[in-house]
Image (cartoon, rainbow, N blue to C red):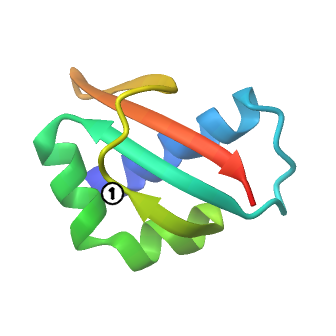
């Protein structure tokens, strides 16, 4: 469930960044450890859904999303 919410938040960050739905991205995630653990556990699903060619878990900047009261920092860069 949390992985789906993470995907939804990343899609919102992509939209806010003005990226096209077909753009490949480099993805950076940071914030709440439980959200990051869900993203790591389902990394292939998350990356596939958002067209990420790479995922970095040390990001502390970019778009901030709230998922079930937890903070997730999302950085998206077109590649």
* Residue name at image x 22 percent, y 71 percent: 41
Q: Residues within 10 Å of mark 1 (few under 14, many from 20)?
A: some
Between residue 4 and residue 61, name the one nearer to us. 61
Tell me the quarter of the picture where residue 38 sits: bottom left
Horizontal side, residue 69 vs residue 60: left or right: left
**Which residue bears the numbered disc 1?**
3
Q: Is residue 70 above or below residue 58?
A: above
At x 22%, y 45%, the residue is 35
Q: Position of residue 18 (x, y in %)?
A: 83, 33
Element type at mark 1: helix
Residue 45 at what x, y percent from top left?
Answer: 44, 74
Location of residue 32 (image quadrant): top left
Residue 44: x and y in percent read 42, 79
Q: Quadrant of the N terminus?
A: bottom left
As drawn, 66 above or below 11? above
In screen coordinates, is 3 left or right of 16? left
Please give the name of the residue rendered at 23% of the width and 28% of the height, measured from the top-left corner: 68
Locate the C terminus by quadrant.
bottom right
């Amino acid at each position: 469930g949390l992985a789906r919410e993470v995907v939804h938040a990343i899609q919102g960050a992509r939209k806010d960044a003005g990226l096209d739905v077909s753009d490949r991205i480099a993805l950076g995630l940071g914030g709440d450890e439980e959200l990051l653990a869900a993203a790591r556990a389902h990394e292939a699903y998350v990356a596939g859904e958002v067209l990420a060619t790479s995922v970095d878990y040390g990001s502390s900047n970019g778009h901030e999303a709230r998922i079930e009261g937890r903070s997730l920092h999302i950085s998206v860069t077109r590649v």
